[in-house]
């Protein structure tokens, strides 16, 4: 298990300085030029033949801005590439083109095969990048987890979850789902993964119980996976730096798909002109080269980007958020108690508390006692008065432990107690004597 001592999650400020070392060479001017030309060609087809209901959905999508998230754009590029490959398969050509009645049609069909191959290669590169990136993130996270059965359980759970997700996709395809339907499901599954990470980081939802048994998971790791995708979190800097070129490529491949779709539907009455074929060929060539360059670049950036940085680099650690602590008023002459159940010996009971002080400093009594199954009480930590205290106690018996804050000695003054307590099961096996 790698140490996280002295580390904090990456921040947007840190990523900004890190990304300064990785400037992306701007996309070729041909991207914007050819995107505009092929969209103009698609609009010419639409002006002569109004879109069908199915075409209208794609036209509306092409009229919208690309998604904001980097990973959603990756999935969109995969979808549009695969849709275009589908259209370029010979079985989906217009009937007039399949007949290849002219030398021009034969030449065009050869070129279509070449375009399909280029797009297929780009698709495989993107799929490989997504797979490797997901494995890299998971494996990096796992290095900071306890290297025992708990890590094994997490790996098994991930594998089982991914098998279930793949089975869900297979079921959709076997039921006749379209490429668009499949990618809508894949993106939903991706968002489910992100929500589960946030739940793990916050120890909520299905992970509330899991985290209890994963004691030993560094808090810095939980903070990282909770904060990483916040709207103004570290990934927003990534979107700011590298989003614009990816957005342009997303727009370009969608325009290519739209143009091919409209051309096939109208091929019987309006064959493509030579200049339109040239624009299509150039657009696919430029898109695949620039997209593969972007994927190669971003792969290097992601592979070298740290998850954690030292507190010195990040600056002084922010004070723990107030909602990490509870605040209670202990009336004069009363006590306040917290009962913790310990299931395993050698667990630790930890506490951190202080009094909210006014014009005069006050203190409060504090003690810890064990309550057996028969109700018998045994004092574990003797009574003592504190203004504040932070400590822990290693248990040698399973059962109930009561933390007691005592204000019975005060006749007039209530005490405002700010506290946090926790029960931490054993993280390591006890050392064996020789």
Image (cartoon, rainbow, N blue to C red):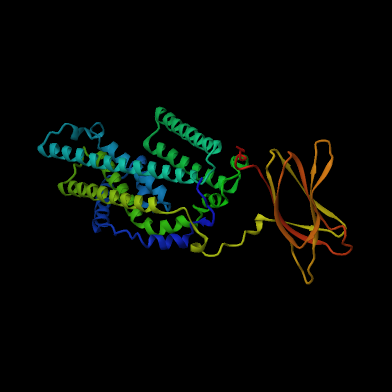
Q: Residue at x 76, y 41 (%)?
A: 400
Q: Nearer the viewer, residue 74 or 345?
A: 345
Res 44 visible: no
Task: Please indicate whether residue 318 sits to the left or right of residue 112 in the image.
Answer: right
Between 404 and 255, the residue placed more toward the observer is: 404
Q: Residue furthest front?
A: 434
Outermost residue toward the left? 103
Measuring from the top left, give residue 124's x and y in whole percent. Answer: 31, 40
Tell me which residue sits at (40%, 30%) in the image: 173
x and y percentages locating residue 48 in the rendered image: 26, 47
Query: Is residue 363 or residue 165 the one in the foreground?
Result: 363
Q: Quadrant of residue 373?
A: top right
Q: Is residue 367 visible?
A: yes
From this view, report whether residue 305 is shown above or below residue 153: below
Q: Is residue 233 left or right of residue 397?
A: left
User: x and y percent of residue 72 in the render?
Assistant: 41, 47
> 14 and 387: which one is in front?
387
In the current view of this chain or complex, which residue is farthest to the top? Answer: 174
- Callout count: 0
Q: Position of residue 352 (x, y in %)?
A: 70, 56
Q: Quadrant of the C terminus?
A: top right
Q: Residue furthest bottom?
A: 359
328 left or right of 183? right
**Above/below status of 174 relative to 37:** above
Up/down of 423 relative to 166, above or below? below
Q: Is residue 164 left or right of residue 382?
A: left
């Amino acid at each position: 298990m790698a140490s996280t001592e002295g580390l904090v999650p990456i921040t947007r400020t840190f990523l900004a300085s890190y990304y300064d070392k990785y400037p992306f060479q701007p996309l070729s001017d041909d991207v914007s030029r050819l995107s505009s030309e092929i969209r103009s060609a698609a609009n010419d087809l639409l002006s002569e033949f109004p879109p069908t209901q199915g075409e209208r959905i794609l036209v509306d999508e092409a009229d919208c801005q690309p998604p904001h998230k980097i990973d959603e754009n990756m999935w969109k590029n995969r979808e549009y590439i695969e849709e275009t490959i589908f259209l370029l398969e010979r079985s989906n050509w217009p009937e007039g083109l399949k007949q290849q009645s002219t030398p021009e049609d034969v030449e065009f069909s050869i070129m279509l095969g070449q375009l399909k191959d280029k797009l297929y290669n780009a698709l495989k590169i993107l799929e490989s990048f997504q797979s490797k990136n997901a494995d890299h993130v998971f494996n990096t996270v796992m290095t900071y987890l306890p290297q025992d059965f708990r890590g094994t359980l997490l790996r098994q759970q991930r594998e089982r979850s991914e098998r279930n997700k793949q089975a869900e996709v297979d079921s959709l395809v076997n039921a006749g789902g379209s490429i668009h339907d499949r990618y809508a499901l894949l993106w939903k599954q991706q968002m489910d993964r992100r929500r589960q990470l946030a739940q793990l980081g916050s120890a909520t939802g299905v992970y509330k119980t899991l985290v209890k048994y994963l004691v030993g998971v560094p808090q810095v790791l939980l903070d990282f996976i909770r904060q990483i995708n916040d709207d103004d979190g570290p990934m927003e800097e990534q979107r700011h730096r590298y989003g614009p070129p990816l957005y342009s490529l997303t727009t370009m491949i969608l325009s290519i798909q739209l143009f091919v779709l409209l051309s096939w539907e109208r091929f019987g009455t309006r064959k493509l002109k030579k200049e339109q074929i040239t624009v299509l060929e150039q657009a696919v060539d430029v898109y695949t080269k620039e997209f593969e360059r972007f994927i190669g670049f971003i792969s290097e950036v992601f592979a070298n980007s740290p998850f954690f940085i030292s507190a010195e680099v990040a600056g002084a650690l922010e004070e723990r958020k107030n909602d990490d602590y509870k605040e209670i008023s202990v009336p004069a002459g009363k006590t306040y108690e917290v009962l913790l159940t310990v299931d395993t010996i050698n667990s630790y009971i930890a506490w951190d508390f202080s009094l909210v002080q006014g014009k005069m400093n006050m203190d409060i009594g504090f003690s810890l006692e064990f309550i057996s199954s028969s109700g018998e009480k045994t004092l574990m930590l003797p009574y003592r008065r504190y203004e504040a205290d932070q400590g822990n106690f290693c248990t040698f018996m399973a059962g109930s432990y009561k933390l007691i804050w005592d204000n019975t000695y005060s006749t007039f003054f209530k005490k405002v107690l700010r506290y946090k307590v926790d029960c931490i099961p054993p993280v390591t096996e006890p050392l064996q004597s020789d």
